[in-house]
Amino acid sequence: MQLDHYSTNFSHKTFPITLVCENVTNAPNIGSLFRTADAFGVQELIFCGDQIPLGRKMTKTSRATEKSVNYRQESDVVAVIFNLKNQGYHIIALEITSKSEALVGFNFPKHIPIVLIIGDENFGVSEAVLHLSDAIVHIDMFGQNSSMNVVQATSVALYEITKQLQLS
């Protein structure tokens, strides 16, 4: 028998993970990021940029998870990263670069809060933010395309991070 939202026995848990979204501006993606953050027990969601649509199109996809996920909007992503870095967060960008490490081979810190940075739907994480990152991880791809949708990639990364944190 399929269970509904009210009959599952998943335990509620929050992980010391802050998800920073650099210029993610597609309303359905933002709604899906709320659902993903809720599903993986993300501590906080920070949307950085000037035109973040949090209206009806976003809420149609979020299915009210914006009411249960801590979030805020900031304009300056570099300032946000500097602030979190000064608070002791380990800054990890999700991006394919010449120096990025495979997600599945990366050991995420167990006793330090983590920032996972995801980037613009078309251009990824900016060079300025990559330079501020303590680590850059990528998802190994086996098809012809070198990337996937930002929400899908975030879900894969959060699955791996929370899996590792639960084993500690």
Image (cartoon, rainbow, N blue to C red):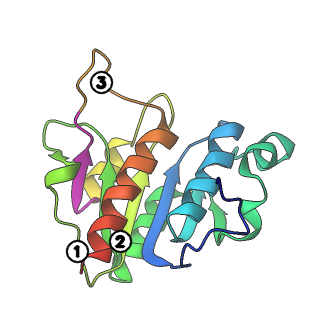
Q: Quadrant of the C terminus?
A: bottom left
What distance separates the C-alpha of mark 2 from that of mark 1? 8 Å
Q: How many marks?
A: 3
Place of residue 140 in the rendered image (x, y in percent of width and height, measured from the top left): 22, 36
* Residue type of the residue flagged with mark 3: Ser
Pointers 1 and 3 in contact (C-beta within 8 Å): no
Query: Residue placed at 35% from the left, 78% from the top?
Result: 113
Which quarter of the picture shows residue 46?
bottom right
Q: Residue 134 lies in magenta, yes or no?
A: yes
The crowding category of the residue bearing disc 3, from other C-alpha atoms within 10 Å (few below 14, some 14 to 19, many at least 20), is few
* Residue type of the residue flagged with mark 2: Ile
Query: Residue placed at 51% from the left, 79% from the top?
Result: 13
93 or 61, nearer to the observer: 61
Residue that badge 1 annotates: 109
Which quarter of the picture shows residue 23?
top right
Q: Give the side of residue 153 with respect to residue 30, left or right.
A: left
- The magenta span reads 133-140
Q: Residue 80 lies in magenta, yes or no?
A: no
111 or 4, nearer to the observer: 4
Place of residue 149 in the rendered image (x, y in percent of width and height, measured from the top left): 48, 32
137 or 35, nearer to the observer: 35
Secondary structure beneath label 1: loop
Find residue 123 and name its label.
none
Pointers 2 and 1 in contact (C-beta within 8 Å): yes
Residue that badge 3 annotates: 146
Q: Give the side of residue 16 with respect to residue 5, left or right.
A: left
Query: Residue placed at 73% from the left, 62% from the top?
Result: 66
Place of residue 28 in the rendered image (x, y in percent of width and height, measured from the top left): 69, 38
Residue that badge 2 annotates: 114
Figure check: 98 above or below 84: above
* Residue type of the residue flagged with mark 1: Pro
Mark before the other along the chain sequence, 3 or 2: 2
